[in-house]
Image (cartoon, rainbow, N blue to C red):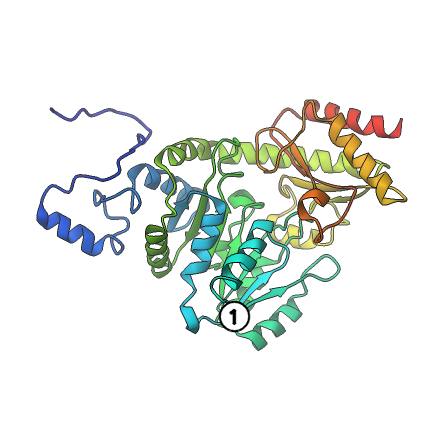
């Protein structure tokens, strides 16, 4: 049967397990060089290795990130595992430094995988007074001589902005690689690779997808040697994303800038609204002048957008009163703002911090809010009504 040519702007979903190799010579060449030729046209063997639908989505992410390569995985955690594992060399691996204000899943990964199962020496670096002291960071770097440092551009849930520019400069000056989780900032606000980061990680489940209907992770970079190591690791561990999820991500990422800019606009307005409410004791948002890392945010992002996450802390003389205000607000807005344990969705969603972070942030009045890209007036009405009921 003659193959049909279809003029379509979209790469179809190739659900192939394996691909036709035509003859023994091509087969021998393919299996010998499949890692080296990770981007060779038509050299497809097996979908755990490479898949054309996945590569089409990776190329779209390369465009958004302005980088030389991107590798998709099935979740943000598998992207983190791939990024970290690229620089691990068994007993020869030097200590690893992780900033403390990072995703809770990453902290669990450090404890359960890196320390417990791999025996890695992991050292953490914590902020003081709501920001990282980079002079102290450099002292730690000199003393530890780590293999890499791992940090987030904007932390979860206190939204501490890390001065990634100085982090990269200091780390490279001391022969240390840099891995940045840029999920909260996204390529719209900041591109660490453009400033020399070695690897950037995203939970593509969040803003790159932006629809709350798939899970995906991606690691991005410019160094071809790092890419080869990452391709090999993804291949043998089996971290490859499914073609169907890659197809949907490829479609959704095309509207990423439009969606995220609207989310950032809504977040600015919502943070200002919260900041004027007497029932709220504290608003954590990098765009507010009293945020501990507002100057760092201005340095990295400029003065227009500051992300789409807000954390609020309800006021009250006792923990019980704070908790009651928190729970009442969550109930009051539940017709529009749902309690869902993720972020980056089209609609605004929220999570109580105490329930999720426990001992790390035992704040009874604290709520993390992922701002959506719905109409501002609808969101404003819901939140205003929810707050008015607390003070009535």
Q: Residue at x 64, y 41 (%)?
A: 304
Give the image location of residue 292, x and y in percent: 73, 54
Residue 339 drawn at (x, y percent): 66, 32
Residue 196 left/right relative to 277 = left
Q: Position of residue 388 (x, y in %)?
A: 83, 27
The one nearer the camera, 196 or 111, is 111
Q: Residue 90, how many percent across, how many down? A: 41, 69
Q: Residue at x 60, y 53 (%)?
A: 102
Q: Is residue 143 left or right of residue 311?
A: left
* Quarter assignment of residue 144: bottom right
Q: Residue at x 29, y 47 (%)?
A: 49
Q: Is 291 left or right of 29, judged from the image as shown?
A: right
Q: Which residue is mark 1?
A: 95
Q: Name the quarter where the N terminus is drawn.
A: top left
Residue 214 position (above or below residue 285): above
Tell me if I can see residue 276 in this picture: no
Q: Residue furthest front?
A: 116
Mark 1 neighbour class, 10 Å CA radius: few under 14, some 14 to 19, many 20 or more:
some
Of residues 202 and 172, the one nearer the viewer is 202
- Secondary element at image label 1: loop
For residue 384, which quarter of the picture? top right
Which is more toward the observer, 349 or 250?
349
Left or right of 230 on screen, residue 215:
right
Q: Which residue is painted at 57% across and 46% down in the image?
A: 185
Q: Is residue 98 visible?
A: yes
């Amino acid at each position: 049967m003659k193959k049909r040519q279809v003029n379509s702007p979209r790469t179809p979903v190739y659900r192939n397990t394996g691909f036709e190799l035509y003859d023994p010579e091509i087969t021998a060449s393919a299996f010998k060089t499949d890692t080296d030729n990770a981007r060779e046209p038509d050299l497809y063997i097996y979908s755990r290795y490479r898949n054309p639908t996945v590569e089409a989505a990776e190329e779209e992410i390369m465009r958004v990130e302005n980088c030389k390569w991107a590798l998709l995985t099935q979740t943000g955690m598998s992207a983190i595992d791939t990024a970290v594992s690229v620089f691990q060399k068994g007993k020869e691996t030097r200590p690893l430094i992780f900033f403390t204000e990072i995703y809770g899943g990453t902290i669990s990964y450090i404890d359960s995988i890196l320390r417990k199962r791999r025996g890695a020496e992991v050292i953490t670096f914590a902020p003081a007074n709501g920001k990282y002291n980079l002079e102290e960071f450099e002292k730690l770097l000199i003393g530890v001589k780590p293999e890499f440092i791992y940090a987030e551009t904007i932390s979860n849930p206190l939204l501490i902005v890390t001065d990634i520019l100085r982090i990269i400069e200091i780390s490279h000056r001391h022969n240390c690689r840099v891995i940045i989780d840029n999920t909260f900032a996204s390529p719209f606000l900041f591109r660490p690779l453009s400033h020399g980061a070695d690897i950037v990680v995203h939970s593509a489940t969040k803003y790159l997808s932006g629809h709350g209907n798939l899970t995906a992770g991606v690691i991005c970079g410019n160094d071809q040697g790092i890419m080869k190591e990452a391709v090999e690791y993804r291949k043998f561990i089996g971290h490859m994303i499914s073609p169907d999820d890659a197809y949907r991500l490829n479609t959704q990422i095309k509207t990423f800038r439009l969606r995220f800019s609207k989310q950032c606009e809504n977040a600015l307005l919502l943070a200002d609204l919260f900041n004027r409410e007497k029932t709220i004791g504290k608003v954590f948002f990098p765009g507010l002048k009293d945020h501990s890392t507002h100057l760092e945010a201005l340095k990295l992002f400029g003065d227009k957008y500051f992300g789409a996450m807000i954390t609020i802390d309800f006021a009250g003389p006792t923990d019980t009163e704070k908790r009651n205000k928190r729970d009442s607000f969550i109930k009051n807005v539940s017709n529009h703002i749902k309690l869902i344990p993720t972020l980056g969705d089209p609609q605004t969603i929220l999570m109580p911090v105490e329930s999720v972070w426990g001992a790390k942030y035992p704040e009874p009045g604290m709520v993390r809010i992922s701002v959506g890209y719905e109409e501002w007036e609808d969101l404003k009405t819901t939140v205003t009504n929810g707050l008015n009921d607390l003070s009535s």
